[in-house]
Image (spheres, rainbow, N blue to C red):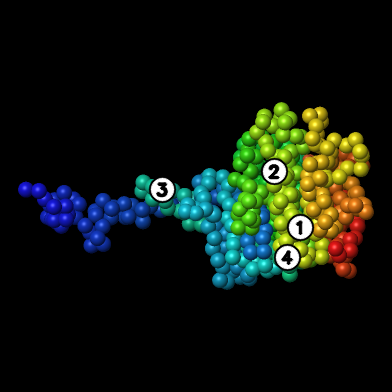
Amino acid sequence: MKIKRRSFLAGSAFLAAAGMAPSASGMLPSEQAAHDKYKATEVPHPDQLLDSEPLLQVPAPDSVGVSFAVNRLAVGYAEVADNPEMTGAKRYVCAGMPLAEISDRVLRVRMDGLKPATRYWYRIGAAAVTYPVGYWMKPSPIEWGALHTFSTPGEGAESRFAVINDTHARWEPFERVVAKLRELKAPVTVWNGDAQNTSRTREDLVNIFLKPKAGAGYATDAPILFNNGNHDFRGQANIHLDEVLMTRLPTERAPRDWALGRNFAIRQGQIALIGLDTGEDKPDFHPAAGGATRFEPYRAAQALWLEDQFKRPEIASAPYVVAFVHIPLFDPNPNANPGTLLEDYAAWQKQAAELWGPILTKNRVQVVIAAHQHQYRFDPATPDRTWAQMIGGGPDLQGNGRFPTVIEGLVADGKLVIRAHDVRNDRIAGEYAFEKR
Ligand SMILES: [Fe+2]
Ligand SMILES: [Fe+2]
């Protein structure tokens, strides 16, 4: 006789004989054993699982990202509150849907649903991940980091920013630059490219961005807006730079612009900050690219994005607009390398200048802040180019008129003030004021 499945399962005597009787909880003994083992497994409290300070990044009026290093497989957290007692704190786990990210080295958490121009307190946390029963994941107790604070951008935020560039993993100049950032306490720092030289492994990126040999904790209390330099595209690791440095949220842009991962246009008080990526300092046909770069269409795509930013009410209404690029958009020397030649490398980026320059002029942008030359310079505006250009210094501490800079932007007495701090000689290298546009 054929036994129906239902009646077979209901035959408890048979099941008990086979050691398969459901328990009082309704679980099969084997399943109950798995639950018991899971519950009984004590996951040890990790010791120094957190392996770096938090790096705040990609600030937006309603969100900010944080990444940090861990020293074994873990899931990450952040807790955020609008008060230092952390009353009513909201807990975030690593981003990812449907699976939250876990990693053996770098964790990234996006804190969203925030209010613009608001001060928050936060701490990062991590839990080691173990698998006591098959694929059943059990996190350890959370190891929490120290309490820090940040403020979100927005039209009501403080009208001030700082800029660093061309730090090139040179730790003595980096230490000086970070000391100046700590003194200025700007609410946001634009890192205007060439943080690296060439990074071949993820650990190279960890050592530059999360565990620098000097100046550690440089972005615990003010987020960075990272803008790529040509060196930030070099080496195998940089194809996966977003494993360490998060990109903008896709919801910040139109589907057409989703590939533009780091371009930013945000209001920091009365100033609109716009980040544009000039890419490599050599043309796509250069053998160094191995036929695998698309910087020319990338710059063209950014022109469409840039045009649209000025249609956003909060950008269109900004009294002051500052654009950030790594490679300059102008060079006073008519023979300067335009970045389109096989020989040598770009002193300025001609394609970007031709595509973006007129849009910046049409929208009366006051200043472009550039980098790449490793020498501080200021180029005043001209009748047919509304924007002046300030170029930050490089990592050179030897002299020859060269010095690292921290550029500071702020609004004072109804004017936008752009000030370059020479951190080698501890003086102001240049200061310029701009009227409302
Ligand atoms: Fe550089
Ligand atoms: Fe550069």
Kind of residue indicated by mark 1? Leu
Q: Secondary structure at mark 1?
A: strand
- C-alpha distance separating marks 3 and 1: 45 Å
Mark 4 CB near ligand 2 (8 Å cut)? no
Chain-order first, disc 4 or disc 3: 3
Mark linked to residue 298? 2
List x then y, in percent, for residue 99: 47, 52
Is 6 left, or right, of 35 in this rendering?
left
Residue at label 3?
131
Q: CA distance from mark 4 to mark 1?
A: 11 Å
Location of residue 90 in the rendering, given as x and y in whole percent from the top left corner: 55, 66
Q: First in sequence: mark 4 or mark 2?
A: 2
- Total numbered circles: 4
C-alpha distance separating marks 1 and 2: 20 Å
Q: Nearer the viewer, residue 280 or 18?
A: 280
Q: Residues within 10 Å of mark 1 (few under 14, many from 20)?
A: many
* The image quarter in which residue 144 lies: bottom right
Residues at marks 3 and 1 touching, judged by CB atoms closer than 8 Å? no
**Amino acid type, residue under disc 3 in the picture:** Tyr
Mark toward the start of the polypeptide (1 vs 2): 1
Disc 1: which residue: 273
- State whether residue 66 appears in this view: no
Q: Residue furthest left?
A: 1
Tag 2, which secondary structure? helix
Q: Residue at x 47, y 49 (%)?
A: 129
Between 113 and 187, the one lying in front of the other is 113
Q: Nearer the viewer, mark 4 or mark 1?
A: 4
The residue indicated by pointer 4 is 314
User: Which quadrant of the view contains residue 285?
Assistant: top right
